[in-house]
Image (cartoon, helix red, strand yellow):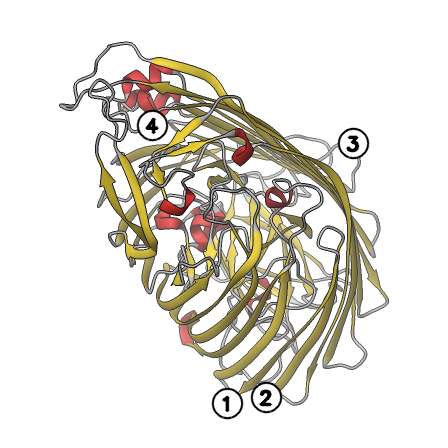
Amino acid sequence: MLLDYNNYKIIKFIIKLILIPFLTFEGGMLNAQQYTKGAIKGSIIDEKTKQPLIGANIQIIETKQGAITDTSGNFSINNVVAGNYTFQVSYAGYLTKIIPDQSVLKDKILSVTVELSEDDKILPEIQVQSFRYENNKMKPISTFSFSRDEISLNPGAQGDIFRAIGMLPGVTSSGGIYSAIAVRGQGVRDNVYMVDDIPLTEVGHLEGNSFFNDPNGGRFSIFAPRVIDNAVFQGGAFGAEFGRRSASYLGLGIKEGNKENIIIDGQVDLLGITLNYDGPSYFNKKTTMFISGRYQNFYPLVNLVGLQNLGLPSYGDFILKTTTEINSKNKLSILAMVCPESFVRNMDNVYADKELNLLYLPNFKRNKIVIGANMRTLVKKKGIWKNILYFTNYTSNVNVGKAYPKKDSTGTLKNTTYNFINPIQTQEYNENKWGYRSVFETSVLKNDRITIGIEADILQLFNNRKLLVNDTNFVFRRNQLLDSTQNFQVITPNLVNSNFKDYFLNSSAFISYFIELSNRLSINVGIRADYSNFSKQIVVAPRGNISYYLNDNNSLSFGLGIYYQDPVYSDIADLPQENILKMERVEQYIFSYKSYLPNDFKIMIEGWYKGFNNMVTTPINGSILRNNNGKGFGKGIDVSLTKRLNKNWHGIISYSYMEVKRNDQDGLGEYNFAFSQPHQINLMLSYQVNKRMSLSGKYRYATGRPTDNYQIYTNILNNGNNYLYGMELLGRNQGRLPYFSSLDIRINYAFHLKKIKFTTFFDVVNILN
């Protein structure tokens, strides 16, 4: 398995150097001859309608400097001493918002856009610091949001949004080894990912298994540190506007370019370098650009810690986002992403593996491409119309070889050189998707909101996988064997080979309606229809939420819904073209309690239940022909206490209990699902010691994941000159791996040299291992 940190105990002491702005351009922008201090410019808008708020107030809490927005909702604060500040933003009839940790730099203009939500008179004593959508009644009560700084300061996450989300209740990140997330007992491929309103299915690098789809997902996010400006996560009961996946919703916003001046930041570490450009485009005065380039190569790290047996992984990410304010009503964003990766393991790596844990020789190259255009139009005073065109591509070219060392019964190698065959298996895989989304929001009454949308895409799949020679699997189930007297499984081409090429037209339509029936009671109902060309299905999925405020600070919510999920594209491409898989069906029921406390504390308790039907399963006879025989249920409770980033410290402590059972109806009966971990505890604290230094720590505990019981057989070939072992799997997930426990710490120290701000940070990942 690629880079399996469970097998290799690595303590990663990686010191990273961040370079924040060191470049200033003249020509309509701030320059050093004009100012010796920084400035703040921006706009304040309505969170729902995106309309400017005239006469809104913004104040720097530390200096008491402030400004009032003009008739376009814009403001400007000049002559601000360089440093980190907290802003307070207020407007009559709206909730006051506190925005912490805003960095004003010398000879630079900080550009900010603030969204305020209307005051429903339920929270008169509470200042709302939560970021963007978290207090939006239209969203589920368990909505969590993250700012750019909260993501980057998360210890052990190294700026990875998915590792930061792994701290939330009900979220599993495969023991912290992987970047991908599994939510409330479902898999890592069951989540809705929206990036600037573009749906993505591939968001990680370097899946744990180098040439098959790994159920644990990728180890690193395709988003470099400080690329994500905001993130909104909903662990269940999300609205009808999101579909074709069933576990959770994660909306990511890529940072927009600075309107006023250039800021360049970078990061250097043992793996490589990241550089970001944030500023005007200079080809159009109304257009800003954000550009991010990252390259990571593991060669220095594996040589430094003596792990040449791993092989050589590398990956990169290039992201370009332009934002054009066409006029006061129309805003166009264009996003382009290219994310290549490769992994090579040769015979030198096998010889370096003294325990011969991995004999395969993978050589793969993969690439992800995203291109999208998002036009946002303000319609009259209350309407927003978004039209999104996009193209996504995922390409994978794989060659896999295998080494064949021989040992005798004492474990002594018969030869110092090993036979090998390269390749024994090849695969060419390609996904292309051309899509369109149109979403319109408006209000009919003062206290309602209606959302209507349509979606369509053309999906093209190509898969050509060939096993060139027979292979042997030494881990097996007895009923997989053609000869039940053998203690190994012979893998023949008919069990592996696949040749698939086809395209499918899919479409969706949805409508949702939110209304506040009173200051204390609100309802959000919706319905979604999806057509799957591959599954030959039209499905209808109703959903709803009801929220009731018990008093000024405490609220209850109940949500339920039906969620249909497309088969994973690679599963479709593994099938003969005359075979089909149905859409999976998940029923969700959620009951929540939330309480806001002073000083930006929030308590959330949420119980949930899920019913699973038509789940895609893999037969245990060794065939690649998957089916929809799976059924099951999941239930659990999540409890969390959150302190948002404000003033000197923030953090979260959470506990989750879950039980998730599946039955593939293959004779092995009911079993614990792979991501079912009954008990999880997360604790994260971050403290700002002074303006230069911050300390943070993160502790995680989780019950071990389910695993199969097994029986070991010796000398399975009855050959003393090639002594091999076999492992028979017994039952399914009847045992458990040891519990997982980790402690991450991070120390940040910032300092200035002339116009350059440096931040060094010492990030130790899992000092317990």
Q: Find the distance from the CA under tag 1 to the CA under tag 2.
A: 7 Å
Asked if labels 2 and 1 touch by Cβ distance under 8 angstroms, the answer is: yes
The reply to whether discs 2 and 4 touch (Cβ–Cβ < 8 Å) is no
Q: What element carries label 4?
A: loop
Amino acid at circle 3: Phe
Q: Are marks 3 and 1 in contact (CB under 8 Å)?
A: no
The residue under label 2 is: 520
Residue closest to the far left: 410
Q: Is mark 3 on a helix, strand or loop?
A: loop
Q: In this view, does 659 lie above or below 554?
A: above
State the residue position of label 4: 358
Q: Which of 607 and 118 is in front in this view?
A: 607
For the residues carrying marks 3 and 4, which lies nearer the camera in this image? 4
From the viewer's side, name the closer residue of 354 and 595: 354
In space, the residues marked 2 and 3 are separated at their CA atoms by 50 Å
Query: Residue under circle 1?
Result: 550
Mark number, residue 10:
none
Query: Which amino acid type is marked by label 2?
Result: Arg
The first of marks 2 and 3 along the sequence is 3
| Marks 2 and 4, how far apart at CA | 60 Å
| Earlier-in-chain disc, 2 versus 4 | 4
**Disc 3 target residue:** 283
Which part of the image, by quadrant, shows the C terminus?
A: top left
User: Residue shown at 18%/20% (left/top)?
Assistant: 408
- Nearest to viewer (mark 2 / mark 4): 4
